[in-house]
Image: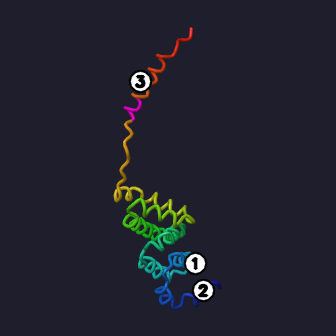
Amino acid sequence: MVFYVFIPVFKGYEILLSTCKDFTILSEMLILVDFYDIPRPVSAIQNRIFALEVDKDNLIQAMAAVGSLEKLKLGQDIATTLELRCIKFACDKLDSASTLGHFVTDNCDNIDLVIRLINKSKDFLSKSAPIDTPKLHQENWRTTRETKWSSMNSNLPSIP
């Protein structure tokens, strides 16, 4: 009986889908059609998700959609593909420490999604923007420290 109630909602859905540019709405639509087992609009919603461009304004929104879709059996492949697109965008556009820092501060309300994106793309980000790290010559430091410590100990009076 409930199935018949939702059929008019999806009648003519292709026109409405073509205007939707929100990953969150599209993922919630997939959750709805999965819950009510309505297979007809699944491929159209999937195609619309793949047709949307990932950009800096909707990157976190896309990552939120990934989190929602990966919980669904029918959404796991879509979530994986969308997440790879997000990682590719992050690697291409977040190519400096400055842009990455601005991205993190701009999206601090969704820090869990930011951290997930950075963790998933950290190998690619480090290759695209190498960071010069100072070398800490540990062996020399230890030798110097041990030498100083032994010279300090030699100057101390011995305790009988």
140 within the magenta span: yes
Q: CA distance from mark 2 to mark 1?
A: 10 Å
Query: For this rendering, which residue is in front, 73 or 79?
Result: 79
Of badges 1 and 3, the one in the foreground is 3
Which numbered disc, 2 or 1, marks the residue that appears first in the sequence? 2
Vertical side of 68 occupied by 14: above or below: below
Query: What amino acid type is highlighted by mark number 2?
Result: Phe
Which numbered disc, 1 or 3, marks the residue that appears first in the sequence? 1
Q: Look at mark 3 in the image and give the residue it sits on.
A: 147
Give SS at disc 2: helix
Query: What amino acid type is highlighted by mark number 1?
Result: Leu
Region in magenta: 138-142
Give SS at disc 3: helix
Q: Is residue 159 left or right of residue 122?
A: right
Query: What amino acid type is highlighted by mark number 3?
Result: Thr
Q: Look at mark 1 in the image and give the residue it sits on.
A: 32
Of badges 2 and 3, the one in the foreground is 3
Vertical side of 35 occupied by 7: above or below: below
| Residue 4 picture location, percent across and down | 61, 88
